[in-house]
Amino acid sequence: MSGSYDVQDGIAVATMDTPPVNSLGIGNRRFIADAICRAEADPAVKAIVLTGRGRAFCGGADIREFNKPEATMAPDLIDVIDLIERCEKPVVAAVHSIVMGGGLELAMGCHYRVVQRGTMVSLPEVRIGILPGASGTQRLPRLIGLEPALNMIVTGNTVMSEVLAAMPGQKLFDRIVDGEVLQAAIAFAKAHADARPLPRVRELKVTHPAPEAYLQFARNMVAAMSKNYPAPLRCLDCVAQSVRLPFDQALAYERAGVTELVWTPESAALRNAFFAERAASKIPDVPEDTPQRPIKTVGVIGAGTMGGGIAMNFLNAGIPVTMLEMKQEALDRGVATIKKNYEAQVKKGKLKQDKYEQRMALLSTTLDYAALKDCDLIIEAVFEELGVKEKVFTQLDEIAKQGAILASNTSTLDVDKIAAFTKRPQDVVGMHFFSPANVMKLLEVVRGKQTAKDVLATVMAVAKKIKKTAVVSGVCDGFIGNRMIEQYSRQAGFLLDEGATLQQVDKAIEKFGFAMGPFRMGDLAGNDIGWAIRKRRATERADMKYSRTADKLCELGRFGQKTGAGWYDYQAGKRDAIPSDLVNKMIEDHRKELGITPRKISDEEIVQRLVYALVNEGAHILEDGIASKSGDIDMVYLTGYGFPMHRGGPMHYASQVGLYNVAETMKRFAKNPRDDAAFWQPAPLIQKLVAEGRPFA
Ligand code: NAI
């Protein structure tokens, strides 16, 4: 039984009760259908109220049923909605908290809807590359009008119930109440028990003064906004049928749209991201009920590029931060940057002045470690040198309270070594933010050999609180993201050596969908960072082959946008990348030195070499246990490295191309004498999956 059914005073109340959000799995679909049939057959029942217990009226389809036989078991949602609408007794939906997707379609199938103020209303299907396929595209325009309905459906945006209820002429909500919705719905049902004919949404007409002109205008807008995705335009086509076709024909059209979209690679990619994001917060050997340490105050050491951004995350979440530096000037600079960032938001109208003041009031600064002694979490973001980290962690070990979590934002150093500077390695963890730390979604949580499970559970929960997508990585050089990007950058360098131009490489991968090509990205992040890392590694990994072009660029002092010149030239105050004759000549000279006759390289080869370099290293990362699942790697790339969302992440993309094809291409690259043959041997995991005919996930 998925809920409860009670009859009182002639009103049957059917309450879905499947936490967390009463999703419409087969259990609930059967429960609702049974309740309607039972009420209809019972002469004592005059009207029916349908509601959901707990945190939501109904959150829509049951995502756990995706690709499972249960999804296709009868009755399907369309049948359930049809049954409700055809019922001869009035059915009233008592809607509260959340009404999403199939949940809203269900409510729209009822004859009446009573809603609680503050309810979040949405049809978010487009966000996983499909469309509301249980009559949503036909019923919503009939209830709130063509334009508002189209907006909600093509964006998937949430609209509050009070906003919808206030729209002139809307028929979505028959009553809006402030408090308890169930009693109000029961009273409404009693008052309307004998009213006939019953209002049925299918019988309504969509009214609009010039529907076709509007739809043409909307089509242009939607097409421009959704270049890489077929779903928004398909949504529009379906909504358009609400003014063109009879209801049942339009439903068939809608149905065909869903079937088509489900099979598109874009929808598969979006669904992969959707599931991977949820799965990333689950760590295989850390149970969900692992106790967490309370995090009420945070310390941040270092007020530079990263420290300031890290502090802002916590201030935004209402958590007090104490920032520590070596010198007052550095503190002042750090605070000034934070203020500047907030003030820019205030100016743009994104942040209210009083909120800004509240946030700044949560920030204190200090030069004295003793001021951090009560902090629950202390994050270090000082210079990237092990010696400096040692000093910081030794002092933290002396002053931090028992049970405080000590985190490092290091991007390359060994977290186990850092933990060993303390007598409490179990409390040490990596929290690797990405720049700008107040903006970028990704947080790599680096799990040391001895990091305690409750520390991990706490940091994952903190990440959620500060709205980051946290992915757990084991300890290795570069963790997940930077270890992979190194292989990608190496390929970018080899491509230059062999004859590609900077612009060609950047453009090819940008056309694939990356936010920025490797050279523009290098200029933005600072080419000196990679240079320093390569110098440090020269002895550790002397066998690693690189193109020397990046070093030569840095030897010219061209570190990127910050020095006004990098791979490209930059005009003061602008970010446009302008091709540089000097750099192009440097690359040409470099080829001559190596005796390379440049060859023409196709865009396809560029994309394959860059992306498959990520894939092969990603596979090694999985084998080494640095990432626990391929979806984690995809999340790192989607949220931290600008990998195109519509491709679903490198590992998902490779699985879509087919690992056999990917492996064969890698073997071909291994034969290129200018490239790194050893690297291009497909990782054993890829070979194994090819043999088994399986994808990564
Ligand atoms: P930064 O040079 O901008 O800031 C470092 C700050 O730490 C400086 O203000 C310095 O005065 C302060 N500092 C140095 N030693 C200190 C000590 N003993 N006590 C207190 N403060 C001290 O450096 P950035 O870029 O913020 O990097 C910080 C850390 O974050 C590094 O470990 C870096 O690898 C990591 N990181 C940097 C990213 C970036 O894009 N910049 C991205 C992710 C991680």
Image (cartoon, helix red, strand yellow):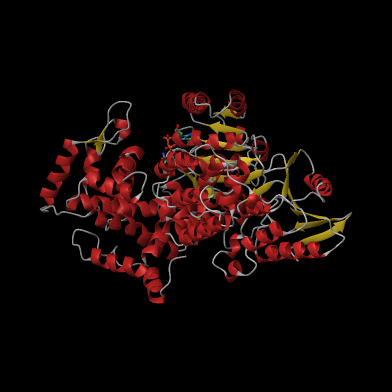
Q: Is residue 55 left or right of residue 569?
A: right
- Tell me where residue 375 appears, x and y as whole percent: 63, 38
Q: Residue at x 49, y 30 (%)?
A: 326
- The vertical placement of 266 against 120, above or below, is below
What residue appears at the point 45 percent right and 43 percent down from the top-left corner? 434
In the rendered image, residue 254, in percent from the top left (x then y), is placed at: 52, 56
Q: Kindly give the residue lying farthest to the right in the view shown.
A: 9
Q: In the image as oriented, which residue stretches furthest toward the bottom? A: 691
Residue 545 visible somewhere in the drawing: no
**401 and 145: which is toward the camera:** 145
- Residue 260 visible: yes
Give how far across and how far down residue 530 sits, in percent: 32, 45
Q: Quadrant of residue 374?
A: top right
Q: Quadrant of ligand 1?
A: top left
User: Is the residue 408 above or below the residue 494 in the image?
Assistant: above
Residue drawn at the location 78% of the way across and 56% of the way down? 89
* The N terminus sits in image quarter: bottom right
Question: Seen in the image, is 483 located left or right of residue 377?
Answer: left
**On the picture, is 393 further left or further right than 48?**
left
Look at the picture and state if 348 lies above or below 625.
Answer: above
**For residue 224, what is the image quadrant?**
top left
In this view, the residue in front, 145 or 576, is 145
Task: Give the percent coordinates (x, y) of residue 339.
Answer: 51, 25
Q: Return the residue nearer the eye: 571 or 379.
A: 571
